[in-house]
Amino acid sequence: MTELDSSVLNLITETATNLPADVRRAISRATTKERAGTQSMQALHIINKNIDMARDNVGPICQDTGMPTFLVHTPVGVNQLIVKQAIKDAVAEATRRGKLRPNSVDSIDGKNSGLNLGPGTPVIHFEQWEHDEIEILLILKGGGCENKNIQYSLPAELQQLGRADRSLEGVYKCIMHAIWQAQGQGCSQGFLGVCIGGDRTSGYSGAKEQLFRDVEDVNPIPELAELESRVMQSADSLGIGTMGFGGAVTLLGCKIGALNRLPASFFVSVAYNCWAFRRLGVRIDPQTGAIKRWLFRDENPARMAAESGIPTTGREIELNTPVTEEQVRSLKVGDMVVISGPMYTGRDALHKYLTTHDSPVDLNGAALHHGGPVMLKDEDGNWCVKAAGPTTSIREEPYQADILRKFGIRIVIGKGGMGKKTLDGLVETGAVYLNAIGGAAQFYAEAITDVTGVDFLEEFGIPEAMWHLMADKFVAVVTMDSRGNSLHADVEAESLRHLGELAVAK
Ligand code: SF4
């Protein structure tokens, strides 16, 4: 199988950069359904443009290229050890080429392994089958949506929905609750894989396997087909919308499977996938290792973005960093902001560090971007940004307000919103939270014109390092302001009310 390594590398590259055909169609349908002039529609325009840019640039659709998870079917007689090694070699090479972000971190000492290899990385599942081809399926599911996976043990009491019994009605309630709890943190609009039954481990695994179904297929089990359709009809009434901005479309797909269970257990496991639903497959010749055909892929996809590009309102507010307290206090929820000037990245490791140490740079008036970019060195040895979207901000909730007070940061950029403690901190210190469009990594990479420095690269690794970036027209929406308003809190409360209406409607 001399061509196997390059076939797997090709699969990884395409999966990271070229969104599947069925996913593209689902996003296009959502774009026609969303109301014009809303923040959700604005986000969809950026998402569509980003999908095109990723294909054009052969760059990661989202900077979080997730946990590479392979499902491999082999004919009897194929040496699985050779396939496994080819996958590992291809994952390392794709990381060197900037198609995958180095995402594998030692859970004890926090060190990044560098090439996405290590205990449990990548994830590879093997199964034998009767066909005479090798099938390799790959999903790249990022941490933001992975963190919104959820498992229920029935019977259970669910907020606003009441008791979920051990029945399909109970399963329906769990799924609706799962969509609600994700809000925008998993980069809605989402796709769901659901498993009814199994044990705690096989349930989650079965839920993820459902994500390998075609978005447009029909479940062969009539009861589950009906349930999938019911979830799809109900989900949009929650009004969570794209990125949790509030809007007409919340869910793009729901696939449900079932496994037998122990009499004492009844689990409902939900795998939530963001709009950047990256999964493709290939059928491979077991003699040569060459790709015979692709699964889910459109080789020459139509453009997603409208010719006219991203619509503007003329009311966008231009800011040059560092900014003053007065500038920030004039911003309010709903404002579209365009930032130029220095910007610093910081995620979990940096936030924890800054609570007990000084900052290596002056952060007074600065913009702090919750982002872990994909970075590569060019031929002159200079760092350049290959993908640069925001990460889920809520993880920094325990630290953010203290860091605002300590360093005078005025702008926090992330996605999914933050909680009460941070909101109080924004009010007290005169700062603002901007929601960038999660997953729009190519769109935002284009808005970074220079990398002027980096701190903690050795200690924290590429995603967690503090990158010093120069932004040029970086677009984001004010979703939490210094007057105590939070779009996230509003959408969460409103969607919770709609969740309760679903229970009443039954
Ligand atoms: S689109 Fe959002 S949830 Fe999905 S991988 Fe990217 S950052 Fe994570």
Image (tube, rainbow, N blue to C red):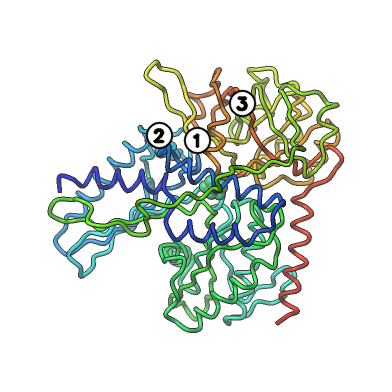
Residue designated by label 2 = 98
**Mark on residue 210?**
none
Q: Which mark is residue 387?
A: 1
Which residue is tagged 3?
471
Label 1, label 2: how far apart the Cα atoms are = 9 Å
**Disc 1, disc 3: CB below 8 Å?**
no
Residue 189 appears left or right of 38? left
Q: Is residue 143 visible?
A: no
* Dot 1: element: strand
**Three-letter amino acid code at the position of disc 2:** Gly
Q: Amino acid at mark 3?
A: Ala
The x and y percentages for residue 419 are: 75, 46
Q: Are marks 1 and 2 in contact (CB under 8 Å)?
A: yes
Q: Nearer the viewer, residue 111 or 98?
A: 98
The answer as to whether callout 3 falls within 8 Å of ligand 1 is no
* Residue for point 44% across, 37% down: 101
Q: Which of 14 and 118 lies nearest the eye of the viewer?
A: 14
Q: Residues within 10 Å of mark 3 (few under 14, many from 20)?
A: many
Image location of residue 116, percent across then percent down: 39, 39
Q: Does residue 436 appear in the picture of this structure?
A: yes
Indicate which disc, 2 or 3, sits on the residue closer to the N terminus: 2
Q: Residue at x 66, y 39 (%)?
A: 396
